[in-house]
């Protein structure tokens, strides 16, 4: 009996992952607004009814994908010894990890900008459908201010909002620069402005 429950859990996990992977591909190919649940499930090779065993809406799928990206950033920061780094080093590393993941999952950034316009229940969707990067940036900035590594005359939420907006503006940049390099240079300028002298 236990073995059967284990197999059932594995099957459910695989089906959920299949739906998430298919949704990510469809969002990237067609955009969030032009992707239907039926299209996701067709790409997943599963019936439409199966979708609702795992997710309540497209927005729910997007939020799950977004949270997975934040978890990946946190995992990368841990792997690079986040606790031993200075706050400026940690913030730069966090921004670079975030840029890499967004660059590898390009469907997600435009969705931060447009998905809330297409939500059935905007009150249940976090601001800009963010995976929480802004909050992660803010935690690092606050840590840096407490340690005297960052200026304290500007609130952490203002600085984190500026960093978060770098990703949005870079998505629309016409400069002949790769996405990650564009982010890296902009973050370097911002870090120079918030470090204590």
Image (cartoon, rainbow, N blue to C red):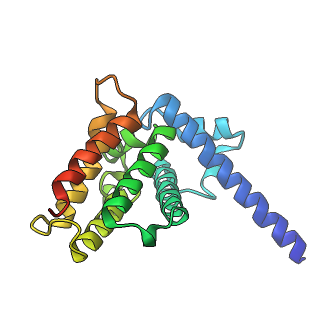
Indicate left or right for 188 with 18 as reference.
Answer: left
Residue 113: percent from left, percent from top: 31, 42
- Residue at the spot 25% in from the left edge and 76% down from the top edge: 147
Closer-to-camera residue (22/52)? 22
Closer-to-camera residue (25/197)? 197
Q: Quadrant of residue 138?
A: bottom left
Q: Quadrant of residue 37?
A: top right
- Residue at the spot 30% in from the left edge and 36% down from the top edge: 170
Q: Is residue 188 visible?
A: yes
Q: Quadrant of the C terminus?
A: bottom left
73 vs 110: above or below: below
Q: Is residue 130 visible?
A: no
- Residue at the spot 16% in from the left edge and 53% down from the top edge: 193
118 vs 68: above or below: above
Indicate left or right for 77 with 130 as reference.
Answer: right
Q: Quadrant of the N terminus?
A: bottom right
Indicate left or right for 76 with 47 as reference.
Answer: left
């Amino acid at each position: 009996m236990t073995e059967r429950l284990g197999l059932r859990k594995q099957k459910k996990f695989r089906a959920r992952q299949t739906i998430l992977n298919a949704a990510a591909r469809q969002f990237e190919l067609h955009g969030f607004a032009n992707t239907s649940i039926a299209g996701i499930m067709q790409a997943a090779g599963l019936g439409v009814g199966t979708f609702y065993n795992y997710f309540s809406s497209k927005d729910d799928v997007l939020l799950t994908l977004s949270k997975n990206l934040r978890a990946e950033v946190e995992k990368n920061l841990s792997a690079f010894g986040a606790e031993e780094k200075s706050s400026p080093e940690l913030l730069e590393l966090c921004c670079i990890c975030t840029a890499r993941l967004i660059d590898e999952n390009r469907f997600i950034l435009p969705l931060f900008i447009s998905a809330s316009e297409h939500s059935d229940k905007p009150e249940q969707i976090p601001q800009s459908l963010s995976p929480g990067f802004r909050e992660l940036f803010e935690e690092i900035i606050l840590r840096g201010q407490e340690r005297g590594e960052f200026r304290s005359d500007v609130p952490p939420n203002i600085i984190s909002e500026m960093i978060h907006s770098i990703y949005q503006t870079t998505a629309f940049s016409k400069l002949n620069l790769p996405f990650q390099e564009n982010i890296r240079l902009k973050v370097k300028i911002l870090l120079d402005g918030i470090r204590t002298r």
